[in-house]
Amino acid sequence: MGAYCNNDVSLSPPVVHTFSSSASSPMDLRLSKHVHDNVHGNIYLDPLSLKFIDTEHFQRLRELKQLGVTHMVYPGAVHSRFEHSLGVYWLAGEAVQKIKQFEGLELGIDHFDVQTVKIAGLLHDVGHGPFSHLFEREFLPLVQTGPKWSHEEMSVRIIDNIVDEHNIDIDPAMIRKVKEMILASSEHPLPKGAKEKLFLYDIVANGRNGIDVDKFDYIVRDCRACGLGCNFQFQRLMEGMRVLDDEICYRAKDYLTIHKLFYTRADLYRTVYTHPKVKAIELMLVDAMVKANDYLQISSYILDPREYWKLDDTIMKTIETAPDQELKEARDLILRIRRRNLYQFCNEFAVPKDKLEHFKNITPQDIVCSQKSAGATLKEEDVAVSNVKIDLTRGRNNPLESIKFFKDYESDDKFTIPDARISHLLPTSYQDMIVRVYAKRPELVEAISDAFENFQLKTYGIKTQVHATPDKKKRRICGNPP
């Protein structure tokens, strides 16, 4: 790994650390290999973690952009899953060490626990596919039948493969807990056998309330890469956290800091991750991958963790440079992306709050069936629809209600903060569902926009979009400028 050094000299501005790791003595740190990260400063790598890092499976993360195709709209968003994984590794170690510093004797935290949490942070994203979440949420459901595939479950399979293939000498009990911690989300409840030190499962992927170091890292890292401000300070939460009844709890006075965590995440979803242009490019890339799948067998890589490491973002370059006639349609779509001849964003509407509970995803068929005006006859393949859900991690529920707080360090009581006791300036609704419609050919913008308006009238009795599609966009007959 070329970035390793023992005396790292960087031209980047120095990063001021809030924490000083107590994982090793100063002499150990001086002898440790480390990388200089532009968010956390020097990240020190322990010997066991290095054995996982120096594998083709983990190095593959260098070729996976953290934000998929977002860099085509926000040019600075070219950071990788590799950087993020090192950041989560570091913060996971800092978090468990912080708890150990103040409550280690009482909670029985030992080296095994510290190492396990760090390895879980390091490997939590090793199962991600190309273009971030696009692979599992948008592409695979169109080409695969059977049980839902997840990158967390793939991470677990890859970890087993790394240990076996590279003969890594690691306690089987540690690997079991690492995999449990990676799966410890709301979709993957904790195994029935996990009964002790459950608070450790809150650190990397927190299924109880969504506060974890994975979010701490990617929120700060993504804001920085996209040139956005970030007023969320995760250091404050890490300094004040405390374990009560086997659960990480937070000071009651920090509830606004926690709200900033969830609000900043939601704002990133709205302005960056689901930006209308980003979604247009994603829709085109998914169409290209679907068209290329039969020939390149892209989806087959998920069947074998020994082959999966060969699949990364370079699949896009493979498609666009291959001369094969079987890939012509997919190649043409990627060429349109390169030339900024994107699917045209027509309009969007937010689903009314009282309709969210029973909302079903809108499809191109819904739009085509709503066409009334004369002119071009629309077909389903002319229309693309993006159903965008933005929430504060708990769907339509207030995330603060699933977080346990304590009054001060003199008290052992934990409690939740109900809505009625929270600032009235904070939102009373915690989820948005935004429906966007795109024309795959620019000359169809007007017809699709009209059908989209008819759909809203038919479904809700009113037009819920903010404004009509601009006439200039309706008259456009060529692609977008860069």
Image (cartoon, grey):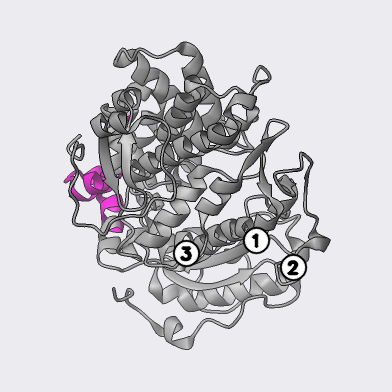
> At x 61% / y 32%, what residue is drawn?
103
Mark 3: amino acid: Cys
Q: CA distance from mark 1 to mark 3?
A: 14 Å
Residue span colored magenta:
309-333
Q: CA distance from mark 2 to mark 1?
A: 9 Å
- 318 vs 225: above or below: above
Q: Mark 3 — residue?
A: 230
> At x 77% / y 49%, what residue is drawn?
416
Q: Which picture quadrant has residue 44? A: top left
> At x 29% / y 16%, what residue is drawn?
166
| The one of 349 and 1 positioned closer to us in this rendering | 1
From the image, which quarter does the N terminus lie in? top left
Residue 148 in sight:
no
Mark 2: amino acid: Ser
- Helix, strand or loop at label 3? It is loop
Mark 1: amino acid: Leu
At label 1, counting other C-alpha atoms closer than 10 Å, the crowd grade (few under 14, some 14-19, many 20 or more) is some
> At x 73% / y 46%, what residue is drawn?
406
Circle nearer the N terminus (2, 1)? 1
Residue that extends furthest to the right in the rendered view of this protein: 420
Q: Mark 2 — residue?
A: 423
Give the x, y percent position of residue 316. Answer: 28, 48
Give the x, y percent position of residue 297. Answer: 33, 33
Circle nearer the N terminus (1, 3)? 3
The reply to whether the magenta stretch includes residue 374 is: no
Q: Mark 1 — residue?
A: 256
- 416 vs 129: above or below: below
Label 2 with label 1: CB-CB less than 8 Å: yes
Left or right: where does residue 126 sit relative to residue 340?
A: right
